[in-house]
Amino acid sequence: ACLRLESAAVQIQLVGQEELNNKLCWRVRTVMSDRPDEPVDFWIDERNRFAVYQVEEKLGNKLLTTVRSFYEKPDYPWLPSRIETVERTGDGTVRSRREIVILEAEANVPISRDTFSLAGLLRGQNLSNYFVQVTDVRKGEIIGWWREGRLLNADMTDPLAKEDGRRRTPWNMKRVMVVGAMAMLLLSPLLVKWLRPIKRS
């Protein structure tokens, strides 16, 4: 997936074998046909489950991003124990540097299905008084708002608060007066008919 093989516009080049951190790797380059000045190189170890030890991504002559993965823990050889990311400008100046360290890892551990849901991601955060915007990043559209463990519609209405096909709304003074006026209009013919015999008598 990282080689973007699913794209018809990508070109794959095998640069050759190189030694990286005392390990012999295959250097593979991917180039998008519409962005020939933005190649991405991968250093892959075929003998270690095709681990990717380094990725270099160029943005023309403006930026070079290098990501290195270090597999230093024999307890979990399938996962890097440390990942370093360095961004350099066109003249080689380091613009930013970041390191991620994985302290502990276990395999075949059951993970709750709720872990990666909105409820799981927001667990422990005091957001009861706030609306958290939920956006579909593929379309760039707001699909709703998260509040108090529920996803509201984009117009902040509750999709679950429906009764007989109508949205449940709170009873306020304005609504009481409108309903009362409508009831008076509907009942006025019956009231007139009932009062006429009383006047005659």
Image: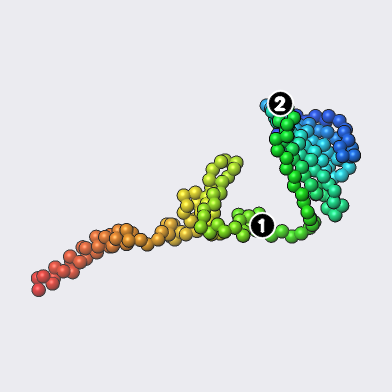
How far, Cα to Cα, is label 1 from label 2?
Answer: 41 Å
| Residue 130 at x, y percent in the picture | 52, 55
| Residue 19 at x, y percent in the picture | 88, 35
Viewer-closest of 2 and 19? 19
Viewer-closest of 21 and 150? 21
Badge 2 amino acid? Asn
In the picture of the structure, the residue carrying the numbered disc 1 is: 115
| Residue 139 at x, y percent in the picture | 57, 40
Name the residue rendered at 86%, 37% in the picture.
Answer: 20
Q: Is residue 30 above or below residue 154?
A: above
Query: Which mark sits nearer the N-terminus, 1 or 2?
Result: 2
Q: Nearer the viewer, mark 1 or mark 2?
A: 2
Q: Quadrant of residue 163?
A: bottom left
Looking at the image, which residue sits at the far bottom?
201
Badge 1 amino acid? Thr
* Color style of the picture: rainbow
User: How would you rate the neighbour count of disc 1 (Cα within 10 Å): few for under 14, some for 14-19, many for 20 or more?
Assistant: few
SS of the residue under disc 2: loop
Q: Quarter of the image for the N terminus: give it.
A: top right
Viewer-closest of 27 and 175? 27
| Residue 77 at x, y percent in the picture | 84, 50
Viewer-closest of 52 and 185? 52
Can residue 76 be seen by looking at this rendering? Answer: yes
The label shown at residue 104 is none
The label shown at residue 61 is 2
Name the residue rendered at 14%, 68% in the picture.
Answer: 196
